[in-house]
Image (cartoon, rainbow, N blue to C red):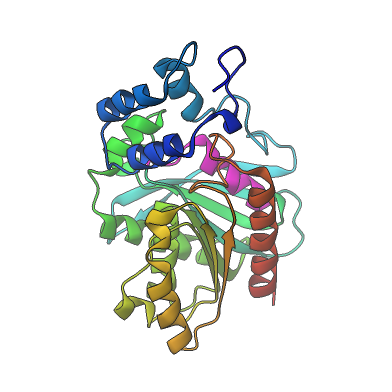
Amino acid sequence: METNKPLKKEDIPQEVFDLYDDYAHDKIDRRGFVQRLGLYAAGSVTVGSLLSFMEPNYRNTQVVAADDPDLNSDYVEYNSPKGGGTIRGLLSIPKDADEKLPGIVVVHENRGLNPYIEDVGRRAAKANFISIAPDALWPLGGYPGNDDDGRTMQRKRDRGEMLEDFIAAFEYLKQHPNCSGKIGVVGFCFGGYISNMMAVRVPDLAAAVPYYGRQPSDEDAAKVKTPLLLQYAELDTRVNAGWPAYEAVLKGNNIEYTAHMYPGVNHGFHNNTTPRYDEPAAQLSWERTLAFFNKHLRT
């Protein structure tokens, strides 16, 4: 490793990214993560510098500003009677839209509605959709301002009830006066799992784009009627292990799907706030996502 320069992505061994993935998905706790980072510290590359480099940076990574002049973007609350009750989400609508727009539910990772996911919601609105990005932590007080505490909080909620919260967000958009009623979902990590499950559970969901999300059971997968665009990372062996069985069910039931495996990238490659981010893969995947939504939500 170079020790006389600021850390760069290429300075970091793949094992550190794998270790971070284990930490981010509760395979090891923070203490274990920090201890094992020590194996990769050398010279001026300290455990502290590695830890700081791997953690998300929300300070200067927004793609669409919270006060973007082309959007009306603000928090709303809606009811999730089978889930957590009252749920808050960020609703983003293009200003001066002269027609009803298709909707997108944006589903966060396993840490609540952090700034990155809010930004993705605004990105969807900038592409001329109405979006809602719910916070499944709202029944516990909402995203706490950092991802570590967010992960801890999200573990306290029931996964099935959180799925109901996002299904309720779909229903909220469907009834919104600015929405055409054609609605899709995009989600990342935990949100990828929720996107898959919404395709199982919501018959009139028009499109689903799971990013590196855990797959449903074979029984559930056979119930999918929604067109799927599945985005996977080649180095994400944990999630990818479930893909062959899922694909076999999709093929066996003639379910419409397209899957992309992005070479040489890690789980979380779309998230531009961490060094797992891969700009070419993130941009290409987002272009594909918007094209998929345009195809299925505007016809």
* Residue 186 vertical position relative to residue 275 in the rendered view, above or below: below
Left or right relative to 76: residue 279 = right
* Residue 102 vertical position relative to residue 286 in the rendered view, above or below: below
Q: How many marks?
A: 0
Q: Residue at x 37, y 48 (%)?
A: 87
Question: Magenta segment, which residues?
Answer: 111-125
Residue 10 belongs to magenta span: no
Location of residue 36 by image quarter:
top left
- Give x and y (percent) for residue 294: 69, 68
Left or right relative to 251: residue 8 = right
The C terminus lies in quadrant? bottom right
- Give x and y (percent) for residue 276: 53, 39
Q: Residue at x 64, y 66 (%)?
A: 293
Answer whether residue 202 is visible to the viewer in this image.
Answer: no
The N terminus lies in quadrant? top right
* Residue 260 vertical position relative to residue 134 in the rendered view, above or below: below
Residue 124 belongs to magenta span: yes
- Give x and y (percent) for residue 197: 38, 67
Location of residue 9 by image quarter:
top right
Q: Residue at x 47, y 57 (%)?
A: 212
Asked whether 224 or 12 is in front, the reply is 12
Answer whether residue 276 is visible to the viewer in this image.
Answer: yes
Location of residue 271 by image quarter:
top right
Q: Residue at x 40, y 36 (%)?
A: 20
Magenta stretch: helix, strand or loop mostly = helix
- Give x and y (percent) for residue 178: 63, 60
Left or right relative to 227: residue 298 = right
